[in-house]
Amino acid sequence: MNIDEIRERWADPLLTGLTALLMIMMFVVSPLQALGIFAFQASELVLALLLVVGIFVISGSPIAVMAMLIALGMITVGAILRIRSPSILDLNLFAGSWFIVGTTMAWAVARATFAPGRVTYHRVIGAVLLYMTIAVIFSALYTFMGSLVPNAFAGMKVEDSPALASQVIYFSFATLTTTGYGDVAPVHPIVRSLCNIEAVFGQLYPATLLARLVTLEIAHRDQDS
């Protein structure tokens, strides 16, 4: 079985698999890292490696795989620097690596989800994955801004610690879903602008593209019954 046959057979199911992997990373591993239960250098490397394999099968693009490998290298360098001498450099390396991972995954997942052909259950889950990937991208951007501007947020200090990933993911999803609990708020004008963009996307995407995919999946299922 060559790579094209593998991609044709497993591309759609991998959308569901990557969704589960990303959910575990954000909603299980990150909180456990904040509690000191997981060693966050090792867990990030393992998760990034699994994402590289998944993106390669879904996209088949050497450029996408190269970008993911560069991100994996940045995570490795950041982990080494963090162990030797923690600083803002390793924090930005981690933020940069997950920005690359997020944008590359969003591109690959969007291509697979909205490709011509039958809309399956896995493609609907892929649309959910794309929605979650946007939160990852903005989490990296918020980390960049928080490291450059110490008082960019009220209620959250961006510093190199095991709890940071959980904090920025929490804030990003609160913004994406417009939950806005009020415990963390953007202060810097650029951060506020980023929050506005994420909030607009978070409201329009489920109501338009995701809803359309669900409608098409139901219609295709009814045709088969």
Image (tube, grey):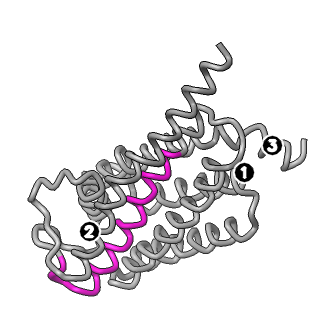
Residue in the picture at 68% in, 17% down: 224
- Which residue is disc 3 drawn over? 6
Residue 110: quarter of image = bottom right
Q: Residues within 10 Å of mark 3 (few under 14, many from 20)?
A: few
Question: Seen in the image, is 153 located left or right of residue 17?
Answer: left
- Which residue is disc 2 drawn over? 196
Amino acid, disc 1:
Val
Q: Residues within 10 Å of mark 1 (few under 14, many from 20)?
A: many
Mark 2 to mark 3: distance in Å? 40 Å
Mark 3 to mark 1: distance in Å? 7 Å
- Which residue is disc 1 drawn over? 57
Amino acid, disc 3:
Ile
Residue 97 horizontal/vertical position (percent): 50, 72
**Pointer 3 or 1: first along the chain:** 3
Q: Is residue 6 above or below residue 183?
A: above
Q: Residue furthest top?
A: 225
Q: Which residues are magenta?
A: 127-152
Residue 21 horizontal/vertical position (percent): 50, 45
Query: What is the quadrant of the N terminus in the image?
Result: top right
Question: Seen in the image, is 173 located left or right of residue 131?
Answer: left
Query: Of the numbered discs in the image, which one, if any, rests on residue 17?
Result: none
Residues 180 and 20: in front is: 180
Query: What is the quadrant of the C terminus in the image?
Result: top right
Tags 3 and 1 touching, CB below 8 Å:
yes
